[in-house]
Image: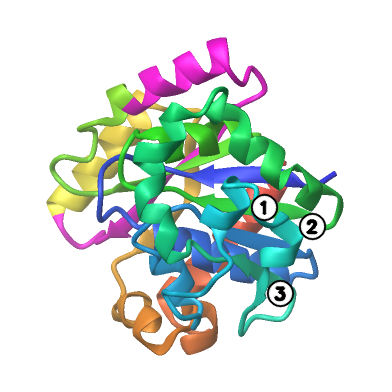
Amino acid sequence: MGKVYAIANQKGGVGKTTTAVNVGACIAEAGYPTVLVDADPQANATVGLGVERTRTPGLYEVLSGDVQAEDALTETVVPGLMLLAAGPGLAGANVEMPRLEGFEHRMREALEPLRSRFGYVLLDCPPSLGPLTVSALVAADRIIVPVQTEYYALEGLASLLETLDRVQRDLNPRLTVAGMLLTMHDSRTRLGREVEEEVRRHFPDLVFDTVIPRNVRVGEAPSYGLPVTHHDPHSAGAEAYFELAKEVAARG
């Protein structure tokens, strides 16, 4: 059975989508069938893999029960990596879903058939702790938390960890933290080094060894509809994501 990973942090601009796209690409290229589920109404993961933002059917139609998850998958530029696009209807899901009984379990039930076909299912979550993110956490086995190495790096992490505790206690006891990922890191600055030290001091057993550097190629790759591992596979950013994928796999 495949493993389901949620990539989540309610703080925006920390590299969630970039991480989801590139880890998915690296795992797929290593020979493990992988699907990336774009659970963010902004649909940046969809666009980042060269698929139209308006692609349907998407996750919204799957959650609505209009189509099965396997029938909504789209091929990407990366062999072995399939995409379940967000779809334009997903923007209303945060309002509609809480009205449905047992909405927290709907994503888990809808995506369950994918476990038998894919080794990894990655969920790119919205930058919030709303219904879609909670549903993704209920569906996931593990969570990867990207943390930008900036002054406010720890801001909001307490709220996220409290939400994780509630989800574990009430909805999904199997959910665990796979790791916290330091992103957009500039080791040349004192601030970057100090933030890394602080995060590792607060969460010594949770932070991945791999650090994603601030890298121009990582930032420009989505405009080409490619993961950075395809846009410039020899860049520092691509090499870091290859190492992260290895570490994710090693942690199980």
> Label 1 belongs to which residue?
121
Which residue corresponds to mark 3? 29
Residue 140 visible in rendering: no
Counting from the top left corner in percent of width and height, residue 208 is at: 50, 44
The magenta stretch spans residue 245: no
Q: Which of labels 3 and 1 is toward the front?
A: 1
Q: Looking at numbered disc 1 in the image, what kind of residue is underneath it?
A: Val
Task: Determine the residue positioned at 56% across, 17% down.
Answer: 168
Task: Tell me which amino acid carries mark 2.
Answer: Phe
Q: Which mark is residue 98?
A: none
Q: Are marks 2 and 1 in contact (CB under 8 Å)?
A: yes
Label 2 belongs to which residue?
118
Q: Marks 3 and 2, how far apart in space?
A: 13 Å
Q: Residue at x 47, y 88 (%)?
A: 231
| Secondary structure beneath label 2 | loop
Q: Is 167 contained in the magenta span?
A: yes
In this rendering, position of residue 206 left or right of residue 160 = right
Measured from the top left, where is residue 170 in percent x and y? 55, 11
Where disc 3 sits, the SS reads helix
Local SS, label 1: strand
Residue bounds of the magenta highlight: 160-189
